[in-house]
Amino acid sequence: MNHADIDTLVKNWIVDAASRPANPRVQQVVQRLLGDLCKAIEDLDITPTEFWHGIAYLSAAGAANELGLLSAGLGLERFLDIRADEAEQKAGLEGGTPRTIEGPLYVAGAPESVGFARLDDGSESDRAETLFMQGTVFDQEGKPLPNAKVEVWHANLLGNYSFFDRTQSDFNLRRTIVTDADGRYQFRSIIPVGYGCPPDGTTQQLLDLLGRHGQRPAHIHFFVSAPGHRKLTTQINIDGDEYLWDDFAFASREGLVPAIARIDDPAAIDAKRLDKPFASIDFDFHLYRDTEAAPSTIVERNRAAA
Ligand code: MBD
Ligand code: FE
């Protein structure tokens, strides 16, 4: 069958078959995706067995709640970022902190504090490297932004995230920090370890067939928001990770790999009331002012809440 014949068939099923008012956007998108899928079936001679295998795969991925993870691993979430970058560039926005993907592991409702928070519950303190991370949230003119919200979340020493990993305490390694009068935030936590897709999960199953690993380098996630400003979704990477530029989710970016200082001066250790050297990261966030010239950066998606 040629592509024009397929277009006619799909228009018949999706447009002509409608006897009641349709949602035009849904109709438009389904017509396009269905047409593209039928063309792929034709061009690649996808067999019925292969087709039903694909349906079974998507069913299993959905049942396992892994479609968000799959979206990251296939590059689709990165693709949405590339498009958002392009739209901002067209609108003349530049100089802001680079965005990178949210990923599927945010949980709403984390404890909120002003200026400072400790993220970790101390359960891994004996094995972990303590991290202090701090900086300022700036507006487009380089003015500090008090009252900005810095939502932060990251994995533990096993690469696992609280809530999804029920063995961790509630909101371990998750907090919301409101910047102080000088626009500053600081947190104490632990240097996380990179995430790996569940080895027996549906995402890893497909990655295996594609000859790919399912590892992310160690990273820390952020939402940074302030009234009158575009919400920033980003991450920083922990420098030195073997997967730093080999992320299965394609989320590593220049500008998001801050230097890590290793502090071993006894007076500095004492000042933090620690008993061993610690790591320190300085990182500022630069937000864009709200604008109609680029699409909103507020993304609705199913998210966990606790
Ligand atoms: C993660 O921690 C993550 O950030 C992404 C994008 C996918 C899976 C796990
Ligand atoms: Fe993550």
Image (cartoon, rainbow, N blue to C red):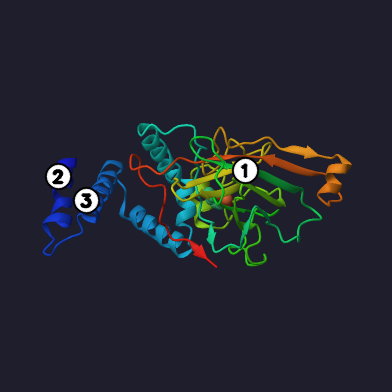
Q: In this rendering, would 276 be left or right of 50?
A: right
Q: Earlier in the sequence, mark 1 or mark 2?
A: 2
In percent of width and height, residue 166 lies at 63, 67
- Local crowd at mark 3 within 10 Å, few (<14), some, or many (≥20)? some
Q: Which quadrant of the structure image shows residue 178?
A: bottom right
What kind of residue is marked 1?
Answer: Pro
Q: In this rendering, would 26 be left or right of 222?
A: left
Alpha carbon of mark 1 to alpha carbon of mark 2: how far?
46 Å
Q: Earlier in the sequence, mark 2 or mark 3?
A: 2
What kind of residue is marked 2?
Answer: Asp
Residue that appears at 45% across and 32% down:
94
Determine the secondary structure under disc 2. Answer: helix
Determine the secondary structure under disc 1. Answer: loop
List the residue tagged with mark 1.
217
List the residue tagged with mark 3.
28
In percent of width and height, residue 157 lies at 71, 53
List the residue tagged with mark 2.
5
Q: Which quadrant of the structure image shows residue 76?
A: top left
Q: Nearer the viewer, residue 208 or 76?
A: 76
